[in-house]
Image (tube, coloured by chain):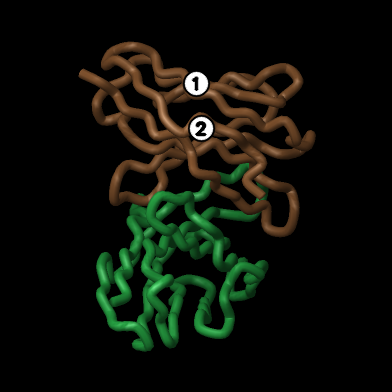
Chain colours: A green, B brown
Amino acid sequence: EAGVAQSPRYKIIEKRQSVAFWCNPISGHATLYWYQQILGQGPKLLIQFQNNGVVDDSQLPKDRFSAERLKGVDSTLKIQPAKLEDSAVYLCASTVAMQAYNEQFFGPGTRLTVL
Amino acid sequence: DAKTTQPPSMDCAEGRAANLPCNHSTISGNEYVYWYRQIHSQGPQYIIHGLKNNETNEMASLIITEDRKSSTLILPHATLRDTAVYYCIVRTSNTGNQFYFGTGTSLTVIP
């Protein structure tokens, strides 16, 4: 079974530039999550989708971050404009459904460096 | 929000059992305990989860106390490849059954 795919793996940009990350979840997984992991910390949830609808985006800085999952499969996370404090690893995860007994599967992440 | 407490770091000799503790004293009756680990530069990897009973799989065992206020992850024969940060997570039963990660335990397996 193929895992969660993410691209790019690494990205370096200057502050005030824009950047986008892509995630392809495991086939058949209805729930998709984006996390931000700052160095030395655990992952922090940014947004959760159920199919193509948003379940929770309360932690997403909506003035600069946006995410979509238009067809309920792939998802993109965008930052516009980036700030220095956005330097982090952005992780995508998916699960077959939202029930508490379903484990999440994580992708390898995209490491963003903002200069 | 993390609802769990773990020691920041632990060492374990290669070949020995690694016992990683976690306190979750405010856990609710329908909340699961999950364990993930994260090896450097990789995404978190699922290890095991449980509700009330002890669980075992090919990677580890999970021992949950009867009052469910704490648990222990056991890696029966630690290898150098088990060196990682281990996260104990209580899966909240609020909207979306989300995970809240703390800072985890950094386990170093020593040759």
Quadrant occupied by the C terminus of chain A: bottom left
N-terminal of the pair, mark 2 or mark 1, is 2
Picture residue at 39% right of the left edge, 13% below the top: B17
Furthest residue toward top: B16
In which chain is the residue bearing label 2? B
For the residue labelled by badge 2, is the local secondary structure a helix, a strand or a loop? strand
Proximity of marks 2 and 1: CB atoms separated by less than 8 Å:
yes
In which chain is the residue bearing label 1? B
Q: Which residue is more in the foreground, B111 or B82?
A: B111
Q: Is residue A8 above or below residue A94?
A: below
Residue B21, given in percent of the width and then of the height, sits at: 54, 24
Q: Amino acid at mark 1?
A: Ser
Asked which quadrant contains residue B81, the reply is top left
Give the residue number, with chain letter if any, for mark 2.
B48
Q: In the shown orientation, is residue A70 left or right of residue B4?
A: left
Count of residue discs? 2
Residue A85, given in percent of the width and then of the height, sits at: 42, 71
Residue A52, given in percent of the width and then of the height, sits at: 58, 75
Q: Amino acid at mark 2?
A: Ile
Asked which quadrant contains residue B9, the reply is top left
CA distance separating discs 2 and 1: 8 Å
Q: Which residue is more in the foreground, B44 or A112?
A: A112
Picture residue at 28% right of the left edge, 80% below the top: A13
Residue A78, given in percent of the width and then of the height, sits at: 44, 80
In the picture, the disc for residue B61 is: 1
For the residue labelled by badge 1, is the local secondary structure a helix, a strand or a loop? strand
